[in-house]
Structure formats: C-alpha cells, structure tokens
Image (cartoon, rainbow, N blue to C red):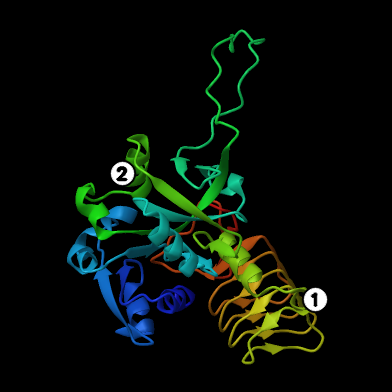
C-alpha cells in the first residue's frame, strides 16, 4: 500500500480514502492521518460490500473531487498513473482502466476484451473455440460467436479513473464495479477505455501470488544468484540462500538450503532444513531437518481453523501453496 500511496501522491492526488476490513486497525496505525502531506480518510467496513459498494459511505468525500482514482489494495505495481490520467483527460471516456500486458490471461479468467483503439468491448471471459460441426453434439451452426480479430485480451490491473458523477447510478451495496457498473455500461454502448501497461504488476490475493510478487518485485539477475536479506537477518555461513527474501529477525541455521522462498520476520529455519517455493510465516520455528516444498507454513492458532488439505505437525500448519 505504501508503493500505491507514493504513486498517487506523485501524480497529484489531493486526498486518499482507504477502505478497511481485515486487520484494518493495523493499516490505520501504519499510515496515520496523512502520507507525505496527502490527507488520508479511513472507511471501516464491517461486512464486505464489494468493490463498488465500498464507495457508498465515501460519496460525500468523492463528490468533491474532479476525478476519482480507484486502486485495488492487494495489488503491487509500478503504477503509471500519470499516463492513465493524461489519457482520460484527453479522450474523456466514462471510465479509463489500467490493463496489464504482462499478466498471464489464464491466471485471471481470460482477461477483458479491448479493441486496438483501446475501447473495452466486454468483461466476459472469452468464448470457447468454435466447433467444426463434425461431432453430433456440435452440429453446423451451433458454434459460439467468436471475438473479432481486432479485439485483444488483457488483464484488468485494478486501477481505474472516472468522474464522480459516474457513481450517481451505482447499484445498492453489496455491488461490484465490473458486474454492476462497467459491464452494463459497455452493453448499453457507453465508452469504457483501457490503457495498457507493460510495467510490473502483481495481484497479491493468495499466498502463492504474494510469493510471486515479492520475488518478482525485488528480483534482478545478480539478486537471483544470492537472494535479498534484511540487515537484521542472521544466516549461518554454511547455509545456502538463493532467489529468496529473508525479512528482519530471520535466523537460518547451518546447512539449511532455501530456494525461491519468502521467510517472514522473526522466523527461524533450523539446521539442515530444505525450503523451496514456500512462504514461512511470522515467528515460525522450523525444526531441524524439515523439508518444505510449495507450502505456506504458519503457527497453529485456535481461532483460525486450518484448511482441509493442511497438515498440523508440532504446532505448525503446513498448507498447500496454491492460487485458491
């Protein structure tokens, strides 16, 4: 969120509102009442109201703005917000969306349809390939309509800009930007545009995506050979760490081997442990000789039941590091 707030301040944002739900007080404590002189207002949401419904309590705040920028809080990106702003001011669509040309379409439902001129044609997933009529279950004329060749697919990156007047017809919460506002506008012929970015963008909505985001954000060729570690991390000279991130207070024992993993603050990796493609949680004490691959490892807590696929060993929860 700090990277996002920095990008907003640099592009001339006059004030920002942050929607809070899970562990919201920690966010408010971290950022306080302003970010480098840019005032912050907090909106606390007891029940999830959706991406659009979350703006309902902020209508009076947003109505004072000339333009509104909305950004997903769980995205990590080098946001080209000045580019997004210039495009919107020049072309004046109902809304302008940032889309990523780097994100894998298959990881995000196939993306959204956009013309070569940048106009959004649909938020629906792409249609399956048309049949050839040779199968009895797929007779001639039964093929699904295919998208025109001039339409390309890109992933909506969760940053968009519009005038506050667009919210006058917003659905009652809970409601969603795409389902309840943008898709109906496109279907009625209104103009929604997209600006493409090839800069780094990561959705951090699952543990695996969080790991991919952290590794991708700090990665360089020289970094990949060694990894990044906090100055407050302690690594035994006989341990091997590559392509990984070790945060403050981490301790890595003799003979341990860590590859493409994230070790969160105050965690301890025991002697001869092997950790690959995994996230080791806050203050986890990984016993000597443990082998961990593609797992999220956290301390067991009575108030958080583990997923059905997880294993609990020695007070630690070993969960599959998937995209769900």
How many labels sit on residues?
2
User: What numbered label is drawn on residue 295?
Assistant: none
Relative horizontal placement of residue 174, taking residue 288 as reference (left or right): left
Query: How much space separates mark 2 and mark 1, taking CA atoms?
Result: 47 Å
Q: Residue at x 58, y 41 (%)?
A: 152
Question: Circle 2 sits on which residue?
Answer: 180
The image shows residue 110, relative to residue 130, as above or below, that is: below
Residue 230 falls left or right of residue 10: right
Q: Position of residue 90 (x, y in %)?
A: 41, 59
Q: Secondary structure at mark 1?
A: helix
Q: Position of residue 7 (x, y in %)?
A: 46, 75
Question: Going 27% across and 66% down the picture, which residue do you hit?
Answer: 66
Q: Marks 2 and 1: which is nearer the front? A: 2
Asked if 283 appears above or below 165 in the picture, the reply is: below
Name of the residue lying farthest toward the bottom: 232
| Front-most of residues 143 and 265 | 143
The one nearer the camera, 39 or 237, is 39
Image position, residue 267 (x, y; %)? 59, 80
Of the numbered discs 2 and 1, the one sitting upstream in the chain is 2
Residue 50 in the image: state x and y as whole percent. Answer: 32, 53
Of the numbered discs in the image, which one, if any, rests on residue 225?
1
Residue 228 location, quadrant? bottom right
Query: Visible in this render: residue 36?
Result: yes
**Mark 1 neighbour class, 10 Å CA radius: few under 14, some 14 to 19, many 20 or more:** few
Query: Element type at marker 2?
Result: helix
Which residue is at the front of the view, 47 or 318? 47
């Amino acid at each position: 969120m700090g990277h996002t707030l920095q990008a907003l301040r640099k592009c001339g944002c006059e004030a920002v509102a942050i929607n809070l739900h899970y562990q919201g007080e920690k966010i408010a404590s971290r950022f306080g009442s302003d970010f480098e002189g840019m005032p912050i207002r907090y909106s606390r949401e007891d029940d999830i109201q959706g991406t659009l419904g979350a703006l309902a309590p902020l209508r009076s705040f947003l109505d004072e703005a000339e333009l509104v920028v909305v950004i997903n809080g769980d995205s990590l990106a080098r946001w080209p917000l000045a580019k997004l702003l210039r495009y919107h001011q020049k072309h004046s669509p109902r809304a302008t969306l940032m889309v990523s040309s780097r994100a894998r379409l298959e990881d995000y439902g196939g993306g959204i349809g956009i013309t070569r001129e940048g106009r959004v044609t649909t938020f629906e997933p792409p249609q399956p390939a048309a049949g050839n009529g040779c199968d009895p279950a797929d007779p001639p004329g039964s093929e699904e309509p295919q998208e025109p060749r001039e339409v390309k697919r890109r992933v909506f990156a969760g940053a968009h800009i519009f005038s506050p007047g667009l919210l006058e017809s917003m659905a009652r919460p809970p409601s969603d930007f795409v389902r309840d506002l943008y898709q109906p506008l496109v279907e009625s012929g209104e103009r929604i545009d997209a600006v493409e970015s090839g800069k780094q963008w990561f959705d951090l909505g699952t543990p695996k995506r969080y790991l991919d985001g952290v590794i991708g954000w700090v990665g360089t060729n020289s970094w990949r050979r060694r990894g990044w570690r906090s100055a407050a991390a302690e690594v035994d000279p006989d341990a091997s760490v590559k392509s990984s991130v070790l945060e403050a207070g981490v301790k890595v024992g003799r003979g341990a081997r860590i590859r493409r993993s994230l070790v969160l603050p105050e965690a301890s990796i025991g002697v001869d442990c092997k950790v690959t493609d995994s996230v080791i949680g806050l203050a986890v004490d990984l016993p000597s000789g443990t082998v961990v691959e593609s797992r999220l490892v956290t301390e067991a807590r009575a108030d958080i039941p583990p997923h059905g696929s997880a294993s609990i060993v020695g007070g630690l929860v070993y969960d599959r590091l998937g995209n769900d």
